[in-house]
Image (tube, rainbow, N blue to C red):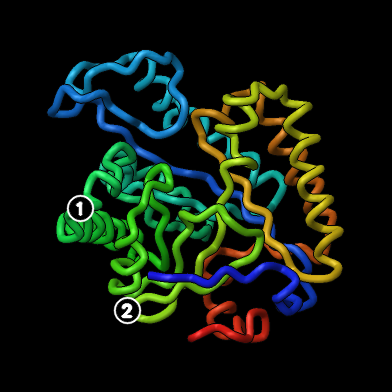
């Protein structure tokens, strides 16, 4: 896998289709955590814990497990209602094991016609555990894709690794499997091409800065501060998109953003953005399909 460093002054203007200026992509991460693991190593579940002391994986950590499960039992349903109220879609990512253990959530997304992107098998089984064993990494990805396809009814168009912890082999593997994009890289505000032995894929940037782990948990923003931050991010990117198209990524987790005292920030931000007619609420697959066809008008010296 390789990708070029092309600074913005060396790029052509990115012209989104149909007169759109800015892509806004609000991700609902639909994740699943095993209650206990086989080994005694500390269980890394991805993201900040409710209580900081890491327990051995084979010991039930009730506070952290049940805090995360709140997102499945309560938070996601409040977020679904909020997106429905405003009338905008989410691009959802999906741990495959959620299909087996919490199928009602998957079915609710399918009923809405929203995008589902495979997000590993189980949230705590990081691909980086297999960096020195690409055969085992590919087997784990295969197991996730198999369950995903059986539950969703089609192949996953792309991939987001648990905690964004992919390896140098991951883009090669997902290209080999016929996927079009990867979302693990946070290094841009525009898509770009990654070259692999199996052909090009699109890197569609994600964000850990504009992410509820960041603004609600790590920075301890209030609901009002979060709303103002989200609007500030949008306003600046929208202004810059007069010259070249940009992408605003917002990452949400139901066990964080789905609480009653936080939902106003999400609802009011979605309502604010919806007042702009030239915003594209694109799925990742729509972006990847369009960019694969048009990337040379953006970065002409691409090898692909």
Provide the residue designation for mark 2: 197
Quote the CA–CA distance across marks 1 and 2: 19 Å
Front residue of 72/45: it is: 45
Front residue of 87/4: it is: 4
Drawn side of residue 27 relative to residue 246, left or right: left
- Quadrant in the picture for the N terminus: bottom left
Front residue of 34/9: it is: 9
SS for dot 1: loop
Drawn side of residue 103 relative to residue 286, left or right: left
SS for dot 2: loop
Decide which of tag 1 and tag 2 comes sooner along the chain: 1
Q: Position of residue 243 (x, y in %)?
A: 84, 70
Label disc, if present, on residue 132 of the rendered structure:
1
Q: Position of residue 88 (x, y in %)?
A: 67, 54
Q: Residue at x 79, y 76 (%)?
A: 19
Residue 82 in which image quadrant: top right
């Amino acid at each position: 896998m390789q990708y070029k460093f092309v600074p913005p002054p060396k790029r052509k203007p990115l012209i989104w289709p149909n007169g759109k200026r800015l892509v806004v992509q609000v991700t609902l991460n639909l994740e699943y955590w095993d209650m206990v693991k086989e080994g005694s190593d500390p269980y890394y579940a991805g993201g900040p814990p409710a209580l900081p002391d890491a327990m051995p994986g084979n010991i039930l950590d009730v506070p952290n497990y049940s805090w995360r499960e709140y997102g499945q039992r309560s938070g996601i349903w409040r977020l679904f209602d909020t997106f429905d109220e405003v009338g905008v879609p989410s691009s959802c990512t999906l741990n495959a094991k959620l299909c087996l253990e919490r199928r009602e959530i998957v079915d609710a997304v399918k009923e809405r016609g929203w995008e589902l992107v495979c997000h590993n098998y189980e949230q705590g089984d990081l691909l980086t555990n297999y960096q020195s064993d690409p055969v085992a990494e590919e087997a784990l990805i295969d197991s996730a894709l198999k369950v995903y396809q059986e539950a969703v009814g089609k192949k996953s168009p792309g991939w987001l690794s648990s905690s964004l912890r992919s390896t140098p082999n991951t883009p090669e593997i997902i290209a080999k499997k016929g996927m079009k994009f990867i979302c693990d890289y946070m290094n841009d505000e525009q898509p770009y091409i990654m070259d692999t032995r199996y052909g090009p894929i699109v890197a569609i940037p994600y964000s850990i800065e504009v992410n509820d782990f960041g603004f609600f948990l790590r920075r301890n923003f209030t609901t009002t501060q979060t709303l103002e931050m989200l609007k500030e991010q949008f306003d600046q990117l929208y202004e810059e998109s007069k010259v070249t198209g940009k992408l605003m990524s917002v990452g949400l987790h139901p066990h964080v953003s789905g609480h009653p005292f936080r939902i106003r920030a999400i609802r009011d931000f979605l309502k604010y953005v919806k007042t702009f007619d030239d915003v594209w609420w694109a799925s990742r697959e729509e972006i990847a399909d369009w960019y694969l066809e048009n990337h040379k008008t953006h970065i002409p010296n691409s090898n692909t």
